[in-house]
């Protein structure tokens, strides 16, 4: 795990900015998860570069999550209004769901990274035949 980065924290007047940022991150992560759930049954449609890029991006988001958690905790101590409190609670839920989405994406990437088109092309014919017949590598979906 990388060393924790230095973070800048903001006053409660930046809540709207964080709301937009966290909502966008949540929606993007949810879309990626849906895509990768579909890819899970057809890993040969992915190449190693996409897998590695996805792992890197997802790992960075997981490592940076502490910044958002800390920012929300600081804002709770700033005497937010009732509406701001509700928004902080909603953002906490979104942040937790985003973390869960990212963890599932990492699990999917780990499960398919040895079954990409690159790995298939590296195999000799006999190895490919045996892995396909054993069900370890699914037949490509056309």
Image (cartoon, rainbow, N blue to C red):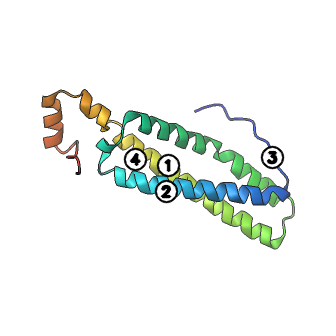
Task: Say which label, 1 or 3, has the lower sequence index.
Answer: 3
Q: How far apart are marks 4 and 2 (CA)?
A: 14 Å
Q: Which of the two residues, 83 or 123, is positioned nearer the viewer here?
A: 123
Q: Distance between the residues labelled 1 and 3?
A: 25 Å
Q: Which of the two residues, 38 or 134, is positioned nearer the viewer here?
A: 38
* Residue at the image point whose x is 36% and y is 55% from the top: 38
Query: Circle 3 sits on which residue?
Result: 9
Query: Circle 4 sits on which residue?
Result: 108
* Badge 3 vs badge 4, beta-carbon distance below 8 Å: no
Query: Circle 2 sits on which residue?
Result: 31
Numbered circle sitting on residue 103: 1
Task: Say which label, 1 or 4, has the lower sequence index.
Answer: 1
- Classify mark 3: residues with Cα within 10 Å, few (<14), some (14-19) or many (20+): some
* Residue at the image point whose x is 32% and y is 36% from the top: 114
Q: Is residue 111 above or below residue 28?
A: above
Q: Is residue 83 above or below residue 9?
A: below
61 sits to left or right of 9: left
Dot 4: what SS?
helix
- Classify mark 4: residues with Cα within 10 Å, few (<14), some (14-19) or many (20+): some
Residue 127's quadrant in the figure?
A: top left
Q: How far apart are marks 2 and 3 (CA)?
A: 28 Å
Q: Which of the two residues, 31 or 85, is positioned nearer the viewer here?
A: 31
Q: Distance between the residues labelled 1 and 4?
A: 9 Å
Q: Where is residue 12 in the image (x, y as percent from the top left)?
A: 84, 58
Q: Position of residue 67 (x, y in %)?
A: 71, 46
Task: Say which label, 4 or 2, has the lower sequence index.
Answer: 2
Dot 3: what SS?
loop
Residue 37's quadrant in the figure?
A: bottom left
Q: In this view, does 88 lie above or below 133?
A: below
139 sits to left or right of 96: left
Count of numbered labels shown in the rendering: 4
Task: Say which label, 1 or 2, has the lower sequence index.
Answer: 2
């Amino acid at each position: 795990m990388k060393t924790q980065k230095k973070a800048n924290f903001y006053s409660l007047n930046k809540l709207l900015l964080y709301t937009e940022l966290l909502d966008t991150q949540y929606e993007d992560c949810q879309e990626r998860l849906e895509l990768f759930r579909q890819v899970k049954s057809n890993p040969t449609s992915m190449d190693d570069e996409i897998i590695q890029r996805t792992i890197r991006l997802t790992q960075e988001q997981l490592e940076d999550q502490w910044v958002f958690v800390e920012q929300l905790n600081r804002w709770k101590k700033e005497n937010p209004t009732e509406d701001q409190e509700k928004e902080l609670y909603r953002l906490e839920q979104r942040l937790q769901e985003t973390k869960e989405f990212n963890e599932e994406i990492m699990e999917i990437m780990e499960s398919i990274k040895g079954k990409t088109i690159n790995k298939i092309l590296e195999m000799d014919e006999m190895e490919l035949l045996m892995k396909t017949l054993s069900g370890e590598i699914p037949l490509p979906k056309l």
